[in-house]
Image: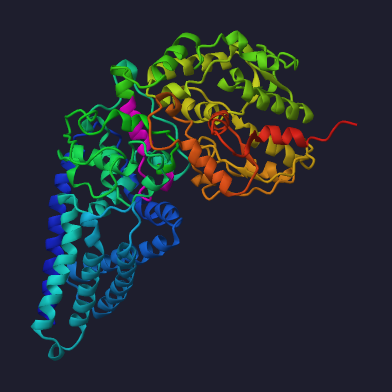
Amino acid sequence: MLWVQIAITFVFWLAVATLAVGLIRRIGLWRNGRPAPVDWAGLLAIPKRYLVDIHHVVAKDGYIANTHMAVAGGAIAALALVALNYGLALYQPWLDWLTLAAAAVMLGGSYFVWARRRNPPTRLSRGPWSRLPYTLAAFAVALIGLTLAAVVPASAMTAAFALPLLLLLLAGSAELALGIGSGGPMKHAVAGLLHLGFHPRKERFTERSVGLRPLDLDAAEFGVAKPEDFRWNQLLSFDACVQCGKCEAACPAFAAGQPLNPKKLIQDMVVGLASGSDANFAGSPYPGLPLGEHSGAPDKAIVPFLIEPETLWSCTTCRACVEECPMLIEHVDAIVDLRRNITLTTGELPGTAPETLANLRETATTGGHDVATRQHWAIDLDVAHAQPGKLVDVLLVAGEGAFDMRYQRTLRALVKSLRAAKIDFAVLGDSEFDTGDTARRLGDEATFQSLAQRNIANFARFDFQRIVTPDPHVLNSLKNDYPAIGGHFTVLHHSTFLAQLAKSGQLQLGPTPDQRAVTYHDPCYLGRYNGEIDAPRALLKGIGIEVQEMERSGLRGRCCGGGGGAPLTDIPGKQRIPDIRMNDAKATGASIVAVACPQCTAMLEGVVGDRPEVLDIAELVAQSLPVPA
């Protein structure tokens, strides 16, 4: 029927106009942010980033992955066909049949959205999000009915049938058309696509991008105090949040009952951008903090008016939220930017963090140690010290673990393996300084940059092929943070290096004499930050250990609670993060928890009561080395 076709065309262009007006309004809010480079070529990459990069994350949950393919795929196809057939007034029956098929797929997906919402997990936001299955279904049903109305003979169609379908189409399309302007649930559909095109970390789509952006301290850039201090594409990225709560479910601080929920933190940034309050937040609040008592505006301080400082200091910077986010939002970047402003302007940090930062500035160690004692762990091992002008294959950077008697056992075990493989290596001894990782995560960018520049100049004095370290935090600083300020090195974690040596046959491993069951805890800064989850497992397999995997392992491993300066800020919760992780380990029935990080060793060994023994990968490998004849 021609009048039905014309009506669909009218509704289509009305929806486009409404969406355009809302988008212009939202762009006005994003433009409150600081300048950032505009990569227009990113718009051309949206299909790949949407179909590949986002779906790669969504695919972790098979149910949602299939639902997403049906709903989003059907909707995009149907909208594209409607735009072609009705937006351009072609009115081709064969395009109607294709639209009918796409809408049917979308309707099927809408059913699964409804089924999930019948008994939703606690991580999902309610409120306006609860109506989503119905508006999606209304849109799909209307398209099915109207495309049928357009292709069947006029004698078989009545206005009484077509008009309700037009109203359904109007209702279904309104959710999308009004969403971006009103801040409704479907805001993410438009903001999310633009976010993919103008992502704050465009390199994330080609590599594992985790290095923090340096501050221009000479230009008085001191982090983020107000929503308008974020870069405009960060503000855009906050609007892309779908409130699925996967970040919430992955957050160790939230699980421990500390006042942090990464989903709400992102929504608080949206509230501040739009000059509102958190009273209408439809998800889980920060543990221990009620809703409705915080509000913000683009030019109003975020802390403490929009969020409490304890929320920021609860974060372990483990990136579990970032790893799980289907919209690829960078929660940790936002948190560190907010910390930077507090640390650099007021210095009001909780716990022992101020003392630690003072130690770093005064002694280049977190514990205020005399650097001359850094090499005491190897005083009887006759380990070579790096000398200017003398080339060595490996420069062994011990990290702060060198001052800890427990972790000295790991370093000594590593030396044993390196010598068994006949590796030419040397240590820095009393010329090794902290890399500044803790300072940077606590927001003290000035101290970090000072230490980094000192280290880069120090490394330049020596000739070496590569750096090997048992500390993933050292690894991450040197490999991912230093390049932005001029430090470029080949850096390997000790598990990666030992696995390479074992694979090449240079390191001969025998079966471990210890036959107890073993589980492996993935350090956040080794796994999520640097993508290394295979080498430790390969080493354990090489010495005859079959790892009893924890429920959360690999890139989805649960944090031990030791990163981001969290042990220093020590924000209380209902339980301790390492206790939660040790319960994960105990559930496997293992008697040993293998680790690969001094922070993880300290946190997990701090768990009291009956628990598995904590041993570093290097210790287990050293135990398996054949006894010389």
Q: Is residue 581 left or right of residue 98?
A: right
Residue 306, above or below 438: below
Which residue is located at x 39 percent, y 33 percent? 315
Range shown magenta: 322-339
Whether residue 113 appears in magenta in the rendering, the answer is no
Residue 64 lies in what quarter of the image? bottom left
Residue at 75% in and 14% down: 380
Residue that sits furthest to the bottom in the current view: 155
The quarter of the rendered structure image containing the N terminus is bottom left
x 39%, y 21%: residue:
351
> How many discs appear?
0
Q: How is the image coloured?
A: rainbow
Query: Based on the displayed image, in which of its 4 quarters is residue 468 positioned?
Result: top right
Foreground pick, 469 / 85: 469
- Name of the residue lying farthest toward the right: 629
- 224 left or right of 464? left
Q: Residue 115 in the image: x percent, y percent?
A: 33, 67
Q: Position of residue 459 (x, y in %)?
A: 57, 17
Is residue 386 shown to the viewer in this render? no
